[in-house]
Image (cartoon, grey):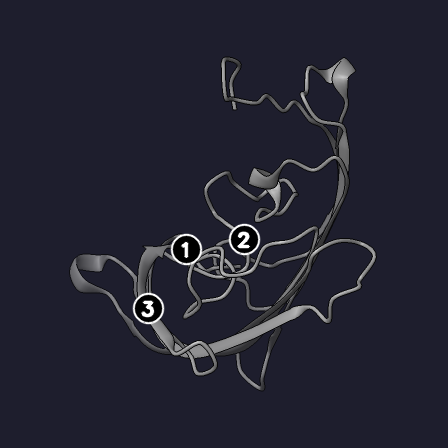
Amino acid sequence: AGGGEGTFRTAEVTAGLLWDSRDNEPAPVRGMFHELAARGAVGATGSSFSYWGSTANLRFYHPLGHERLVAALRLMADVLGGDVPFFLLSGFGGVEWRDGWGGVGGLFTARGLLKNRLQGEVKTVGNGELRWRFLDVRPWEQPLEFTLVAFFDAGQVWTDLRFRDKGLFRYAGGGGLRVAWDNTFIVRADYGVSPRDGTSAFYLDFNHMF
C-alpha cells in the first residue's frame, strides 16, 4: 500500500531456496518442486510495519503405471510473526505467489471454498490431484491434449503462533478438465464443492493450479 492518510506502506526483503526436478514445468508427469522462502520488513526497508515470514512449498508428481495417469500433491505452510499488517494475513510467500491470489480458499488454494475463507498468521494447505490424459488429437496438425482431473483441497489456519485456538479446518473436493495446446498452453476448468461450508464454485483459468 502507498503513503497518505489512512494508507500504509510495506517493503520486504526476501530470500529463498528452490529445487526443481520436474520433467515438464507446465504439465509435469514426474519430479518435484520444492521451495523454502523467508521474508522480513523493518523501518530500515521503508516499511510501516516490522514483521517476518517464512514459507514452505512442497510439490510431488508421479505417474501411476502409465504417463497418462499422474498423481500430484502440493503441501504448503506459511508462518508470520511480529507486527503483521492485517492485509497480509491471507497471503502466502514464495517466488510464485502473486498479490491478489488470496489466502486459503478460492482458485489458487482450495476450490469450492470462498476466497480468503481462512486467514491468520499460521496457514497450511494441502492439494491432491489425480490427472488422467484421456485424449490426444491433432486438428490442423496442432497437438491438443485433454485431461480429466479429480481433486481434494484442504486448509487449516491458526490466529497466531501461540496456537491457543484449535485452528479452523476446511476441505473441498471436485473435478475439472484441462485442455493443453502443444503441452504448454493450458486452459483449466474446475468445479469445487465444500460440504461443510455448503459452498461451491466454478473456476476458469490458465495452467494447472500447481
Q: Nearer the viewer, residue 198 or 74?
A: 198
Residue 38 position within the rendered picture, expressed as x and y whole percent measured from the top left: 77, 39
Q: On the image, numbered disc 1 is attached to which residue?
A: 207
Look at the picture and state if 75 lies above or below 132.
above
Tell me if 46 is positioned left or right of 63 in this view.
right
Q: Label 3's element?
A: strand
Q: Quadrant of residue 107?
A: bottom left
Contact between labelled residues 1 and 2, with CB atoms less than 8 Å apart: no
Q: Label 2's element?
A: loop
Residue 57 position within the rendered picture, expressed as x and y whole percent measured from the top left: 69, 55
Q: On the image, numbered disc 2 is attached to which residue?
A: 103
Q: Nearer the viewer, residue 45 or 191?
A: 45
Tell me which residue sits at (47%, 47%) in the image: 101
Return the disc, 2 or 3, that comes first in the chain's sequence. 2
Label 3 amino acid? Ala
Look at the picture and state if 69 lies above or below 31.
below
The answer to whether residue 162 is seen in the rendering is yes
Return the disc, 3 or 1, that comes first in the chain's sequence. 3
Q: Nearer the viewer, residue 65 or 186?
A: 186
Tell me which residue sits at (74%, 66%) in the image: 165
Q: Which mark is residue 201?
A: 3
Label 2 amino acid? Gly
Contact between labelled residues 1 and 3, with CB atoms less than 8 Å apart: no
Q: Which mark is residue 2?
A: none
Tell me which residue sits at (48%, 76%) in the image: 172
